[in-house]
Image: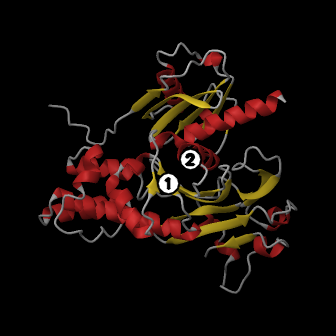
């Protein structure tokens, strides 16, 4: 499943995309994120599956533009969550 | 002072399957408590037995209860008859008689699959205060999704505000928005607050109501299109939620995505979430029995 967490508002599009097929539940992204944006747990959008996946926490989904800003000082910097994911399951839209 | 007519008030609906007797069957239910509307759906085994769709009040547990009571009206069913109930939507954790809460994303895919058939690949749920685009497989399992719940621009609540501003019943907005000489430019923002200001300005310039409605519907269609572009549209394509009933937006969106047939169902498009929840309730009940 390609899960897009985030929002689009008047200032732009802010989505963190997680490819749950690639996710191996290693929790490296959870450890790497200094602000608690990432979590690993039950797949809320696939209730009949028992497999855990990475997701963006409910509280952060509406403010990732601000929460993630310190990890994006320049366009060349790779945010720690993306760097930590050996499976290349995480991408940012902005 | 005379009461102001409630132009925003959309038609609530209720339905019972006339040829079905629930007795001796497994009864499962789904309740979708949304920001604007609440639905309750009852299944008898795997068949749709009854549903109700009504406005959400200020209290989520109460809205869930009211919708369920309305769906059960004249059926002799009571809450203890429900073998398993799943809650979904904005107020999903506040459904007092439910055993589990499941996200709207999963429920709309599952409900859409039942309502529109296994060929459905893209479901766009246009709710009261948010918008979700979902891709699913032939079993109604989510393969891709995008949700925008931060900003209510281009949603049902915005349309209610416009109906009220222009003094037009929300049920007539779609038809009236086509009763114009020439399609106007869309309003420049779908943000309800900005769009309302802009519309007031247009009315002052002498624009007829219908033309203002056309400009708003087309701005809404365009905004949804930009959201859809992120995940793409695969056929078959269907719209669920209250806006699905608004031709003014649906026809303009069809034009923008250049997909002609947006599938329709004989059931109220607002029940998709609750229907999905009821189908999950049945699946979870069966899983528990094994």
Q: Secondary structure at mark 1?
A: strand
Q: Earlier in the sequence, mark 2 or mark 1?
A: 2
Coordinates of residue B4 in the picture (x, y in percent): 20, 36
Instruction: Choose top left, top right, bottom left or bottom right for residue B132.
Output: bottom right
Residue indicated by mark 1 = B238
Q: Residue at horizontal 64%, vertical 48%? A: B106
Residue indicated by mark 2 = B112
Coordinates of residue B95 in the picture (x, y in percent): 60, 30
Coordinates of residue B54 in the picture (x, y in percent): 43, 33
Q: Residue at horizontal 46%, vertical 67%? A: B225
Callout 2 touching callout 1 (CB < 8 Å)? yes
User: On what subunit does the disc labeled 1 rest?
Assistant: B
> From the image, which quarter does the C terminus of chain B lie in?
top right
Residue B171 horizontal side relative to residue B14, left or right:
left
Relative to B83, say whether B272 is above or below: below
Relative to B100, say whether A20 is above or below: below
> From the image, which quarter does the N terminus of chain B lie in?
top left
Q: Residue at horizontal 25%, vertical 47%? A: B172
Depth order, front residue of B275/A83 = B275
Marks 2 and 1 sit apart, C-alpha to C-alpha, by 8 Å
Residue B60 horizontal side relative to residue B7, left or right:
right
Asked which colour scheme the image uses, the reply is: secondary structure
Label number found at residue B41: none
Is residue B147 in view?
yes
Coordinates of residue A84 in the picture (x, y in percent): 83, 72
Instruction: Choose top left, top right, bottom left or bottom right for residue B216.
Output: bottom left
Furthest residue toward bottom: A76
Relative to A44, say whether B200 is above or below: below
Depth order, front residue of A31/B25 = B25
Q: Secondary structure at mark 2?
A: helix
């Amino acid at each position: 499943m390609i899960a897009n967490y985030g929002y689009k508002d008047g200032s732009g599009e802010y989505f963190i995309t997680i490819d749950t097929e690639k996710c191996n539940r290693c929790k490296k992204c959870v450890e790497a994120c200094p602000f608690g944006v990432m979590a690993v747990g039950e797949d809320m959008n696939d209730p009949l599956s028992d497999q855990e996946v990475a997701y963006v926490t409910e509280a952060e989904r509406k403010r990732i533009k601000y929460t993630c800003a310190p990890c994006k000082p320049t366009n060349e910097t790779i945010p720690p969550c993306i760097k930590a994911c050996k499976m290349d399951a995480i991408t940012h839209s902005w | 002072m005379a009461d102001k007519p409630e132009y925003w008030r959309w038609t609530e609906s209720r339905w019972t399957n006339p040829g079905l007797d629930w007795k001796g069957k497994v009864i499962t239910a789904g309740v979708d408590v949304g920001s604007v509307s609440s639905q309750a759906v009852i299944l008898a085994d795997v068949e749709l037995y009854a549903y109700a769709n009504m406005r959400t009040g200020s209290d989520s547990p109460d809205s869930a209860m009211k919708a369920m009571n309305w769906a059960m009206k004249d059926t002799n069913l009571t809450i203890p008859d429900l073998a398993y109930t799943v809650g979904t939507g904005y107020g999903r954790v506040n459904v007092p008689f439910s055993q589990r809460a499941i996200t709207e994303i999963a429920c709309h895919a599952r409900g859409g699959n039942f309502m529109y058939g296994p060929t459905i690949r893209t479901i766009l749920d246009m709710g009261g205060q948010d918008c979700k685009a979902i891709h699913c497989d032939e079993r109604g399992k989510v393969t891709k999704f995008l949700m925008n719940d931060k900003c209510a621009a281009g949603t049902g609540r915005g349309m209610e505000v416009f109906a009220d501003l222009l003094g037009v019943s929300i049920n007539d907005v779609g038809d009236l928005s086509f009763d114009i000489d020439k399609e106007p430019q869309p309003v420049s923002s779908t943000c309800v607050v900005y769009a309302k200001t802009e519309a007031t300005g247009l009315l002052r310039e002498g624009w007829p109501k219908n033309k203002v409605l056309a400009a708003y519907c087309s701005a809404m269609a365009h905004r949804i299109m930009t959201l859809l572009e992120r995940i793409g549209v695969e056929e078959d394509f269907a719209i669920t939620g209250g806006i699905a009933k608004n031709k003014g937006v649906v026809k303009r969106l069809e034009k923008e995505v250049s997909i002609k047939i947006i599938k329709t169902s004989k059931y109220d498009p607002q029940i998709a979430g609750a229907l999905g929840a009821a189908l999950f309730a049945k699946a979870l009940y069966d899983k528990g029995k094994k």
